[in-house]
Amino acid sequence: MLAGAAAAAAAAAVAPQLGCAPLARRRRAATPAEVRRVATACELCPNKCAVLAVVENGQVKKLDPNPASPKSRGMLCARGNAAIKALYDPDRVKQPLIRAGARGEGQWRAVSWDEALDFTAERLQRLRQDHGPEAVLFSSTEGFQEEFFKNFGLAFGSPNILRHPTLCLASVNLAYSMTFGTVPSFDLLNAHYVIMSGANRFESIITPDTMDLIEGTMNRKAKLIYLDPRFTVTAAKADEWYAIRPGTDLAFILAMLHVIIKEQRYDREFVATRCLGLEELAAHVEHYTPAWAEVETEVPAADITRIAREFADAAPRAVYYAGRRSSWYVNDFQMRRGQAILNAIVGNWDRQGGVVPNSRIALGELLFLPWDDPAAPRVDEIDTRFPLAAKGDGAFLQARENVLAGVPYPVKGWMVYKQDPMNALPDRAKTQRLLEAMDFVAVIDTQMSDTAWFADVVLPESMYLERTDPLHMLPGIWPVVVLRQQVVPPLHDTRPNLEIIQGLAQRLGLGEYFEYTIEEWVAEQAAELPLDEPLAHMKQHGVFTPEGAPFYGRTLAPGFRFLTRSGKIELYSQRLAEAGHDPLPVYAPPRPVGEGSFRMVLGRKATHTHASTTNNVWLLEQTPTNDLWLHPEPAARLGIGDGDLVEVASAVGAVRLPARVTPEIRPDCVFMLHGFGKKSKHLRQAHGNGACDADVLVTAWDEVSGNAAFHETVVTVRKVGKEERRA
Amino acid sequence: MRRRSMVWMAGVAALAAVTAVASADSQAPRQRRVRVSVVNADLAAVVQRVGGSDVEVSVLFSGCVLRPDLDVEAGALEKLAAAEAVVWSGLFHESAAIYQAVEALGPERRSTLSRPAWIDVSHGVARVKVPTSSCEGFVAIQFMHGDPFFWLNPDNGAVIARNIARGLGELRPGRTAAYAANAEAFASELASHAERWRRELAALAGVRIFVTQCGWANLTRLGPVFLSCRSEPGLLARPEALAEQIAAQEIPIVVVDPHTPPEYGETFRARTKARVVTIPSSIGDLPGAREYHALFDNLVQRLLEAAGRGAAAAPKGGAGE
């Protein structure tokens, strides 16, 4: 896979494709090439693989995997290789832009950095004076320079920092934290039995631990049980695939618990010494029998029973994998709690091949001036609506509802960093209304996202290969610190986020809070690493990982206290009960899908990252567009043939795209790949290509964590044309 | 003129507070006293003020509550076994240590603690330094709601007192009004103290002070600029690395806690020009201190001394340089 991807990257670099003209010209130069290799870290997905960039005569020619990193080892996926195309993408925002026409009209005025920063600071200052600092939202997605953006929002005085987790895995994090006191990793390399619910690892994210599992299943070392309404690549490689009825995963888990407890297959010693609430759990799952679960899930009771026995027998080398994505429903937190409890009672905690608490590496930190923390309450009312949730991340969907309703106070401005809420949030029309309701919107990004397209000002950030970022520690079974350092100077009039923030801060009288350079920041972080010359080491190698890793069993020492209320792994959670939630996971059936309707399920492919890469020509070669998966039975009923253009409509909107009539999906579901159907005409490859799932997704969230529930959308499908195009 | 008015109003409030406490206590029916185990001396002082003569208070922990080997103090274990209520800060380090201590008592003794009321004083408090999670899912559950040392913010004192009053009222419903009155009196008195601290610390406006106890950052809005480590509470960078930055930023005052490992103070003294002072972050480490406000009285006085600005009045207790 590596060799193939790297070869594809090299071959593609030769061909004068879109964005490669400078490369092609440079190849004709007769002078000997000056070749450098720079250690850095990929930004194309959340895995943050370590990369060795090959620079020839000032051009990034190739990106190799850095074998020193346990997170990436000798691998760099298609997305990682395609970063070259993101760097040389002719559609990048190349200098600051101020809107010159109506919002979303696409009329822009190219301006200097001084003018852009003056304009932005003046508008922010006006909002602060007229409505208070809390009248500005600061939303961002994860990134090595995200901290500077968040700090700017707080120093400005706004409590309304909104981040990615409630659009992603907040429910997983909270459920595992409430059970184990921490969010663990899953030792796929050493597991002998793996159950995945909708976590489509073989298709949606190809990283070394994906490869570990593939190798394990291929060599018959590990058995993989896979539950998904779709027959995905993961399903194809699994030992057993069950097209579970969507939203019923918790029923499957509760029935497994029923079998394991009733047959006393749990780890009695482990549960007795380290867990709290087995009696309550046993009584709770008494009526969740496999026969009952079969009705709910449509997975045969005999199979549930057998899988439960096999899972318990394989423990501790057995994991019920949480994954980055599962069935996102309004009961998602409780489903994740069920997974965590199941993992706990078989005693796979902190053992090789099991569920392992993350190890960490201490980094130093630069001391900088503190600001007064914001005085106003959060607009999303997270304290009262989601009292157990991580406050600093906010609850994105609740915030959108409240801002549109003008409660509890008016919000008139929005600063966005590296995020595209127009695609990341369900109900794009509603997000657009939010943008249009703002007096001012500023976006910091490398490209003209759909959100940037509706902004007042776009402040172009340098692409990751053009900048140095803070050191980043990746906790894990095998923890690692990576350095992302500048490989080439910025190609265009762009700046790193820190410098953009400093420019704004100085103009707003907040400069003293950001009086440092990225080099000073990195040096202080590195100072804490147990190395003789830590900074030099990081610059040369790009990676640090401690001796002795991977680590197992450190929480199994006698008397160890878990960071839960009782100090034990909490099967029963008093904390949840006090907060008004079920202390044990209670099953609630999913909302029924009416006759003639379908449940919309979503997913990702490893060739694209959310909606951020669908303008990348190399990745588009792999996955050019999206279509609608539809089972042949309903397709025949609706007169829809493979490739026909169909309209998919929900309560909030409709999109058109070609149908893929396939038996590889349940008859009561349809599927659409995320990330396509961009509005931004600046992105010439992405604009108008495919359909945007956010146009039809309805707003729903998990009751405990506030996490968006993306699979609660019911749609109708009708044919509107014949064989227009085909993915 | 305006300043005088505020002082006068504060005096009235303090008088009203004292009257309310006395009144509430004089009306106390003769009931069994509420035995309350409290996680630290500072919160214990507030429990005593709110509960008055109705409560018998014992303190469970001293020193940093974030250390992994936190244990219920030997002398407090017997009282914990007989406690009717546990007053805690919502911090799992505390509750886990309490559960473990109770479990170690054995089955018969444990039964006496089968239903202690857990009074969480953290409901509704304001917190600084609210962290964000990472894509790797790591935000320590202990700190995901922000600074764990929220009681080092005197503005939270009123909320804490009201939470205690509510909890005690559930145990002695007939005394609910008295506890509420005591809490309000406490809050009023604290507000007048806070105004005084604000005035006194105004002399240090803008002065940079490095503190090893990150909870003191709660007081930045009172005047001085408290710099602290922003990583996970309870963790400090190496003293050499910190000393280098303290020297480079020419920070004039460094505050260490009595429980900060001694090498920090030694390194700061050796490698910086800063005045290094040891100031307790709990009245448990202040000899003779009984009241919650003594914590801040002492801090303010010691900071003023360290800055050479003189002291308005002698502190009730303190620790040396």
Image: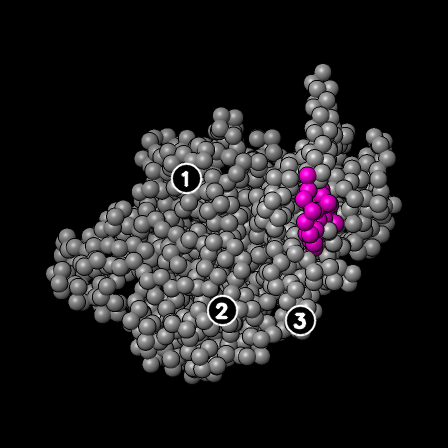
Task: Magenta stretch: give its range.
Answer: B27-55
Residue at (26% x, 62% y) in the render:
A669
Instruction: Give x and y (percent) for residue A474.
Output: 57, 61
- Residue B39 makes an appearance in the image: no
| Amino acid type indicated by mark 1 | Asn
Q: Secondary structure at mark 3?
A: helix
Name the image quarter holding residue A713: bottom left
Instruction: Give x and y (percent) for residue A155.
Output: 59, 37
Residue at (33% x, 45% y) in the render:
A428
- Residue B310 makes an appearance in the image: yes
Q: CA distance from mark 1 to mark 3?
A: 53 Å
| Amino acid type indicated by mark 3 | Glu
Q: Earlier in the sequence, mark 1 or mark 2?
A: 2
Above or below, B76 relative to A414? below
Above or below, B308 relative to B40? above
Q: Residue under circle 2?
A: A280
Chain to which mark 3 belongs: B
Chain to which mark 2 belongs: A
Q: CA distance from mark 2 to mark 3?
A: 22 Å
How crowded is the residue under tag 2: few (<14 C-alpha within 10 Å), some, or many (20+)? few
Q: Residue under circle 1?
A: A402
**A723 left or right of A479 in image:** left
Q: Residue under circle 3?
A: B108
Instruction: Give x and y (percent) for residue A407.
Output: 42, 35
Instruction: Give x and y (percent) for residue B194.
Output: 71, 33
Mark 2 and mark 3, same subunit? no
Disc 1 and disc 2 in contact, CB within 8 angstroms: no
- The front one of A119 and A464 is A119
How crowded is the residue under tag 3: few (<14 C-alpha within 10 Å), some, or many (20+)? few
Identify the mark at residue A331; answer none if there is no mark.
none
